[in-house]
Image (spheres, helix red, strand yellow):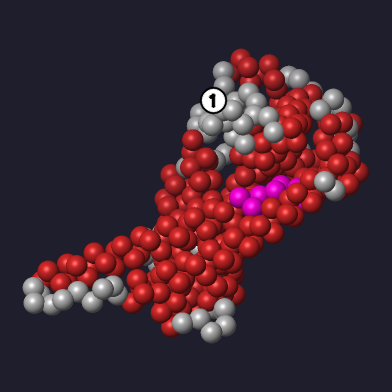
């Protein structure tokens, strides 16, 4: 897919602005639909695996599905709603279904890495303490090290099972009539985009306003976040609140997840109709990366909470899970802190 960059030449912006809005939107949708169909062919025929640096077919499918759905969401008034709304919903289903296996794999890797790091930190502290008291004999590992192995094994069993089920669900989805209906709709989209009458107006008149609505929704959602509280590198109050109950953590996280989704819509809107406004793509991309780290840490903490509910786990295992949960919630707070500073320095519209 050709890389679109917002820092385009003014002449190119003016040329595109004079085109009908429907033509600009249709060109973007056809490009994404073509990428989707190419990735689908690779996934079914096993092609495209020779280049280790190339995104895998599943990633390309999810990527294109998200972009088509986002464009239909932001610029839906320019298309036939009877066609666009169902397709957007089905693309959301497909993207989330295909993403779960990858998310479980990443979550397990994150948690096992964190357990190893926390155990190593505890061992280093013990070694330093023992060095201060030469006569003391090291006890062979602290309380975290005792339960870390069992906690890791428990998480690996649970998340590997979830990953296997997600893989099966993805395979089942790819073979379903529902998926084939989505693929057929995207195939039609690659050649013909059902547009509304309003799409005949100049792109320079319609698209910036619709793009502005996406940015405004994002700014409004960010304005509702507790930014002053999140602006501290160690947010003890928020961390204690998240440790008190899972529902409390979910209530804290939900507004941030919504901002992540709205930021995605805003970024993809700029791909449809880039403007020479001096806003480098790296800035909103950095915001997106921070919010993705926030999501990963929050979901990892929730997975630890679920593992801790396992009946009859040993106290040492429960202790290790508690330390791991606190570590992940601290990463949530660190991501919020980073987002606040990036946002305050980064206009996105």
Give left or right: position of 326 versus 75: left
Above or below, 114 relative to 37: below
Q: Residue 267, position in %: x, y?
A: 61, 39
| Magenta extent | 92-102
Above or below, 6 relative to 315: above
Q: Residues within 10 Å of mark 1 (few under 14, many from 20)?
A: some
Task: Read off the residue under disc 1.
Answer: 7
Q: Is residue 101 magenta?
A: yes
| Picture quadrant of residue 274 | top right
* Residue at the image position 76 percent from the left and 20 percent from the top: 19
* Residue at the image position 87 percent from the left and 31 percent from the top: 188
Figure quadrant of the N terminus: top right
Give left or right: position of 332 versus 275: left
What is the magenta segment's predominant secondary structure? helix
Figure quadrant of the C terminus: top right
Q: Is residue 284 magenta?
A: no
Q: Residue 128, position in %: x, y?
A: 17, 67
Task: Give 302 or 195, whichever is nearer the viewer.
Answer: 302
């Amino acid at each position: 897919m050709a890389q679109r960059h917002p820092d385009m030449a003014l002449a190119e912006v003016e040329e595109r602005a004079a085109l009908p809005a429907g033509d600009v939107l249709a060109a973007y949708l056809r490009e994404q639909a073509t990428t989707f169909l190419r990735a689908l062919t690779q996934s079914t025929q096993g092609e495209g695996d020779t280049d280790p640096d190339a995104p895998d077919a599943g990633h390309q499918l999810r990527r294109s599905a998200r972009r088509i759905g986002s464009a239909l969401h932001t610029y839906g008034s320019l298309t036939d709603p009877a066609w666009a709304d169902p397709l957007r919903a089905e693309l959301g289903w497909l993207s989330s279904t295909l993403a779960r296996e990858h998310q479980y794999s990443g979550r397990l890797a994150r948690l096992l890495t964190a357990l190893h790091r926390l155990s190593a930190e505890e061992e280093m502290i013990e070694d330093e303490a023992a060095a201060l008291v030469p006569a003391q004999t090291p006890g062979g590992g602290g309380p975290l090290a005792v339960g870390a192995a069992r906690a890791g094994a428990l998480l690996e069993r649970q998340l590997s099972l979830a990953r296997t089920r997600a893989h099966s669900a993805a395979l089942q989805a790819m073979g379903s009539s529902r998926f084939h209906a989505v693929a057929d709709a995207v195939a039609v989209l690659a050649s013909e985009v059902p547009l509304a009458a309003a799409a005949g107006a100049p792109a320079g008149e319609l698209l910036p306003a619709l793009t502005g609505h996406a940015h405004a929704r994002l700014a409004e959602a960010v304005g509702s976040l507790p930014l002053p509280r999140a602006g501290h590198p160690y947010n003890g109050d928020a961390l204690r609140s998240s440790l008190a109950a899972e529902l409390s953590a979910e209530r804290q996280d939900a507004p941030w997840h919504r901002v992540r989704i709205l930021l995605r819509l805003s970024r993809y809107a700029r791909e449809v109709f880039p403007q020479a406004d001096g806003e480098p793509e790296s800035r909103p991309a950095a915001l997106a990366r921070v919010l993705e780290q926030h999501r990963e840490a929050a979901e990892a903490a929730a997975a630890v909470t679920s593992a801790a509910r396992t009946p009859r786990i040993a106290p040492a295992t429960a202790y290790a899970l508690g330390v791991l949960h606190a570590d992940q919630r601290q990463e949530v707070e660190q991501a919020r802190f980073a987002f606040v500073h990036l946002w305050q320095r980064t206009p996105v519209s």
